[in-house]
């Protein structure tokens, strides 16, 4: 499974990219607002740091506006994936953009039929929002499983990008189901390395090494 990080904080992205754990980045208007910097500058810098897909979301909700904005963001870098909403106009823009060779991330997916339409429209990525479904009392991971089954049934090439990830367990479950990508907030991504038994074992090793009275270097 590929890891994308869900943030517009370039300093955090640089730190994670240096570790070799990043395959791409997703951003959205809320993350850009939090970063409090010009949108194009943010996307340009991220694309310079991360060679994989960098999702840059359009702000328009009508087809013509999406296409105008997509033309702008596509010029920022070759690895930009244009992010469009899962609406009729969004799917129309998806079809036009993918036909023209662009990567497209169709976002705000909350049902398997929506994901089916996005795949039919040629989406590069479909972004089902796991955490928001859980918040509504539904089963976000069941949606990932439903989409995986449908895409496998018909050999769709659209990649399932599990989004709205809230926990380490979400990442584990998405990987078990077979999501192609998991886009993860930085704090959750860093939490993947943590386990209390790892900490306990390391403390024991450090204590025992001190008792040997030796040094390695």
Image: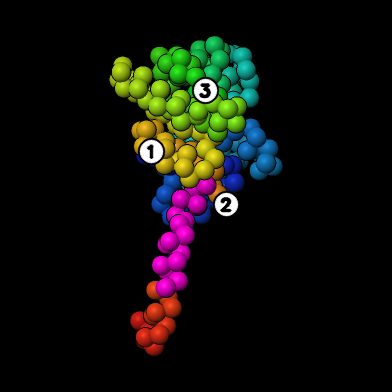
Residue 4 higher or lower than 130, as above or below: below
- Residue 11, label in figure: 2
Residue 64 higher or lower than 40, as above or below: above
Q: Which residue is mark 3?
A: 109
Rendered location of residue 172, percent (x, y): 42, 42
Query: Spatial distance from mark 1 to mark 3, Cα to Cα?
Result: 19 Å
Of labels 1 and 3, the one closer to you: 1
Query: Spatial distance from mark 2 to mark 1, Cα to Cα?
Result: 27 Å
Query: Spatial distance from mark 3 to mark 2, Cα to Cα?
Result: 29 Å
Q: Earlier in the sequence, mark 1 or mark 3?
A: 3
Of labels 3 and 2, the one closer to you: 3
Residue 98 higher or lower than 28, as above or below: above
Residue 31 higher or lower than 205, as above or below: above
The answer to the question of whether label 2 and label 1 lie on touching residues, with beta carbons closer than 8 A, is no
Q: Residues within 10 Å of mark 3 (few under 14, many from 20)?
A: many
Q: Please state which of residues 100 and 54 is positioned toward the viewer in this rendering.
A: 54
**Magenta stretch, residue numbers:** 188-204
Q: Which residue is mark 1?
A: 175
Query: Is residue 147 one of those drawn in magenta?
Result: no
Can residue 100 be seen from the camera position used here?
A: no
């Amino acid at each position: 499974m590929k890891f994308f990080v869900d943030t517009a904080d370039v300093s955090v992205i640089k730190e994670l990219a240096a570790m070799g754990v990043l395959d791409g980045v997703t951003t959205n208007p809320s993350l850009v607002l939090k970063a409090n910097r010009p949108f194009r500058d943010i996307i340009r810098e991220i694309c310079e740091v991360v060679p994989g897909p960098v999702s840059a979301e359009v702000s328009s909700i009508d087809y013509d506006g999406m296409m105008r904005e997509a033309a702008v963001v596509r010029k920022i870098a070759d690895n930009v994936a244009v992010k469009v909403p899962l609406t009729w106009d969004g799917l129309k823009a998806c079809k036009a953009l993918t036909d023209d060779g662009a990567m497209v991330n169709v976002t705000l997916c909350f049902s398997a039929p929506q994901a089916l339409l996005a795949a039919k429209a040629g989406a590069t990525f479909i972004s089902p929002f796991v955490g928001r479904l859980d918040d509504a009392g539904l089963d976000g991971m069941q949606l990932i499983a439903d989409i995986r089954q449908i895409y496998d049934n018909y050999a769709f090439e659209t990649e399932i990008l599990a989004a709205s990830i809230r926990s380490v367990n979400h990442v584990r479950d998405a990987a078990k189901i077979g999501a192609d990508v998991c886009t993860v907030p930085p704090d959750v991504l860093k939490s993947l390395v943590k386990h209390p038994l790892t900490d306990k074992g390391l403390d024991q090793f450090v204590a025992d090494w001190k008792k040997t009275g030796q040094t390695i270097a």
